Structures are given as C-alpha cells and as structure tokens.
Image: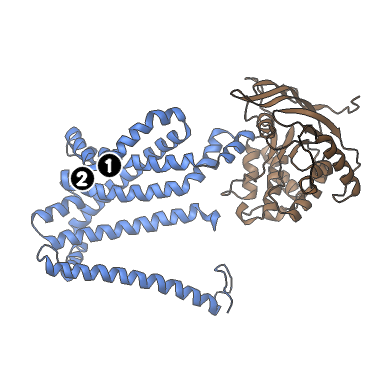
Chain colours: A blue, B brown
Amino acid sequence: MPDLPLSNPIMFHPARWKNWNAVVSGKLLGGVIAISSILLLWYVLSIAVKPWVPTPEDTVVAIWKNLLSTSFWGDFWLTLGRVMASFVTASIVGAAIGILIGMNEKAEAFLQPLLALALAVPDPVYIIFAILTFGTGETAGFVALTIAVSPFVSNIVRSSVQARDIGLDEMAKIYRLPKRVFFRQSLVPQLVPALLTAGRFAFALSWKLVVVVESIGQPDGIGASIFHSFRLLRMREVAATAIIFIVVMQLLERGVLGRIEKKLLKWRD
Amino acid sequence: MNTDTRETVLKVVDLGVSYGETPAIAQLDFEVKRGEFVAILGPSGCGKSSMLNVLSGLMAPTRGRVVVDGDELYLPRSKDPRLGYVFQAHRLLPWRTVRQNLEIVLGASDVPRDTWHARIDEILEILHIAEFKDAWPMRLSGGQRQRVSIARAILVDPSYILMDEPLSTLDEVTARSLRQELTGICQRTGATIVFVTHSIREAVYLADRIIILTRGPAQVFENYIVPLERPRDYDDARIAEVEADIVARVQAPWGLETVKERDVA
C-alpha cells in the first residue's frame, strides 16, 4: 500500500490510519515504559530507604488530600505568581541584553565579560546576597531570580542574533526599511526559535529557583510548604506537594509555550 | 558619438574601492540611461560584488562618486534614492506571505497606501504569480520566489534595479523561462536594469549594452552596444555570433588563452 503524506485529505484511508497508529502506539509505549520504570524504582526505594522515601500509594493519598486543601492552593497561587513575575521579567531583560550584545560590538565588548561572570556564579549565591540585601520579603526573591535567570536568556538570544541571516539585513538596508520595521519584521521573527528555547529554559529555571528561594527565605508558598513538611519529616507530603507542582508546571510549559510556538512558527508547516 | 538622448539615471565617476591596501576596483566610470538594460560582465573576483555594494548604498566607495537621478548617493545629507535589488537568493521574509513581503517594502517607500493593493495585484499579474499572493515563500518554487523578488524590486518604482546573477541558482528550464520574460517585464514597467552576470550569452540575450570589466581590480574594458534588435531568441545563431565576438575581445583582458564552449554558455 502506498505511503500517504500526512496532509492527504483522505482522512479514513487505511494507510493513513496504519501510520498514525504506529506513531501513537510507539510514543505511547515509550511513555508507558518510562513511567512504569520510575514507579518501579520508586517502589523499590520506598522499601529500601524506609521511611524516608514514601510509598507511591501513601503519596497518592497525600496528593488527594493536598488537592482538597485550601492552604495548598493558597501556597500554589502565591508561588505561581512569583514564578510568572520573575520568568517574565528575566525573559524580557535577558532578551533585550542578548539582542543588544548581538547587534552592537561595543555593547558586546562591555557586556560579554559580565555575562560570562553572571553565568558562572552559582544560583544560591544570588539568593543569599539578595536576602542579605533586601531581607526576606518579596523583593529579594524577585531580584535574585531575575539576576540568576536573565544571563541564560541573554546567552541564548545573543547566539541567535549573531547567527542571523545577514542577507536579510542587507535587503532591509537597500529597501530603506525603518529600524522599527527591520526589528519587528526581520530580526525578531528570526529569533523566535531561540526566544522559545530561552523561554522554556527560563520558565523551568524560574520555578525551580522560586521553590528554593521560598524554602530558604519565605514564610509561604510551595517551597516553604515543602520545607515545613521536611522539618516535620512528613516525606509523603513533601513528595505530594512537589509532584502536583511539577505536573502543573509541565502542563503550563508544554501547553502554553507549545501553543505559542505552533502559532509563531506556522509558516514552516 | 553618444546619440542616446534619454536622461541619465545612474552616473559612476572615478569609482575606486580598496580593502586596506588591497584594491578591489581600480577605476570605474559609466552611465546608465532611464529604461536601459545594462549588463555588467566580468570574470570572477574582478570586483563585481564590491561594485554592487557601492551601487546599492551598502558600502561607501574609497574614492569617486555615485550620482542617482542627480543626487549624490554618499553625501551625508543626500536624500535616499529608491533602489530595487534582485539577489542571487531571493531574500524574502519566509514568515510573511508574498503580499506582506511586498507591503513591507512599499511601507518604506512614499507610494500612497491607498494604491498598494492595485499596485501589488498589477505587478504580480505581470509576473504571472497573482495566485500566490497569500502563499508563504517556502511554498513556492525557486523560480516563483525569484519572481516575487523581481516584483519587490519593480514595485517601489526605483531609479534603477540591480540584479546580481538572479538566474544563476535556478534550474536551466526555469532560468530560460524567466530570462525570456525578463526583457518583456522591463519594457512593460519601464524599469532601468543593471544586470550582473558571468554568462556572456545571457548578457547578449538580455542587454541593450554590456559593460565589460577587466580582471580585478576592475576597470571598464569596453562599453559594448549589443547589435541585435528585439525580440531575441536565446538559441539564435546571431546571439552565438555576438557571443563569439565578445569572447574574442575578452581573451586578453581576462587572461584567457582559450575559452571552452562550456564556460561561455
């Protein structure tokens, strides 16, 4: 039977279904094997390192209790707000610095050593200094996260700016495109894949660091809740809180950023 | 004696380009008249790319002047001329449709906005790509993309259009078809063309006049008026005769002992 391209309008052609089923069953099988392996490992560890690693059953019960708890959701929304604030700020600041370094040799000469230094500093150092400077309020976490995350965004964006198609720059100059038009119509669209990668990275780093900041220096939020459970040695609650948060963050990353990616890169389809 | 009474669109005077101590263009002096189709012919490395950069406003020359419609191109307060450029590769924005690519260029010109749609439709019609107005460039063939690139160059009603070997990346069948149409398109739109090519036959087929350059650093070796009436046939024996005549002339200045047929065609 001939292979049919996916764009073929004959939706119910047997060959199409055969291919589709093969793709789905391949992906599904891989996913099932991966999750089963993790569950098996978790189960073995819960027996071997009892009582510090909770069993999967106990954790499921704790997850359910958390989902029904209003205090959990209070912490959840607080943490999500902090993640979004630092993610958005770090992405904008990082992208702006990355574009500046990529486009301007003088800016590159000045900022590149600072960027290299910023990338080399361990993240907890930012957090500790921010807490010492601003105290344990919201500002410390926000500043520490922005400073910790934005260099990574800058680095990814800078590489993409420097690898842009110079031919399009020349086209823009010859046709006298205003700088604003060049920026919006030529430069930024070329950076979209890098911006999406940087966004994904910044989001993942932001939520992990927010949890660390909360556990070190905040009285509330998911990180503080995890740390509180840890101090009371309630490991099933630690695992339950972490799992819910991880799942939601993954859904946000794959769902929201995935949709944005699809929309921005539709011209490639 | 020069009997061409058309006004001068482009005047290149004592043009020289050097990169540090290395000269790329020794001296160029030539003029292009309105509506004229001029081919620039030179061997590889003679400085054609440097010349195109200067004529397109991308790079100031080391010496000399470029005057476009009476205005100096490289004086600090000179007004920006409208130029068209057809690159070897199309250089369209792949994330914008054909129409959007053309609108972006129109937006930077002083063409009134209320005439854009009609103008775009007309030019796309002339280039036989009207049905691809809302297509992404990646959906088009190489020939169709190059047609869009030509449309973009014509659209802004430029003083002149620079064409940098625009057919060299196309397959021979597509290149033939576009070559055949190119002179007709230029006649219909009245565009002034400066067409850079390696191919002597292509230059003879397309141009009213061929400016033959020496080996680099470039100088004008000869202003060759193509002695053929239009329309022309690419496979016509007379084109082959003119081509052979030019090949004989360039052997010395290009340092060629023998020119194989394959190199000429």
Real-space Cα separation, disc 2 to disc 1, in angstroms: 9 Å
**Residue B26, position as x, y percentages in the image:** 70, 24
Instruction: Determine whether the residue tagged by mark 1 lies in a helix, strand or loop.
Output: helix
Which residue carries the number 2 mark?
Answer: A213
Residue A145 got which mark? 1
**Residue B161, position as x, y percentages in the image:** 73, 36
Left or right? Give the position of B111 relative to B182.
left
Left or right? Give the position of A259 relative to A240.
right
Number of residues whose C-alpha sits closer than 10 Å to that of mark 1, classed few (under 14), some (14–19) or many (20 or more): many
Number of residues whose C-alpha sits closer than 10 Å to that of mark 2, classed few (under 14), some (14–19) or many (20 or more): many
Q: Which chain carries label 1?
A: A
Tags 2 and 1 touching, CB below 8 Å: yes
Image-quadrant location for residue B247:
top right
Q: Is residue B222 above or below residue B190?
A: above
Q: Which residue is pictured at 46% across the width and 49% down the height?
A: A193
**Mark 2 belongs to which amino acid?**
Val
Left or right? Give the position of A246 relative to B164.
left
Q: Mark 2 lies on which chain?
A: A
**Residue A55, position as x, y percentages in the image:** 15, 69
Q: In this view, does A98 lie above or below A237?
A: above
Q: In this view, does B197 lie above or below A224?
A: above
Q: Which residue is pictured at 83% across the width and 41% down the height?
A: B204
Q: In which quarter of the image is the N terminus of chain B?
A: top right
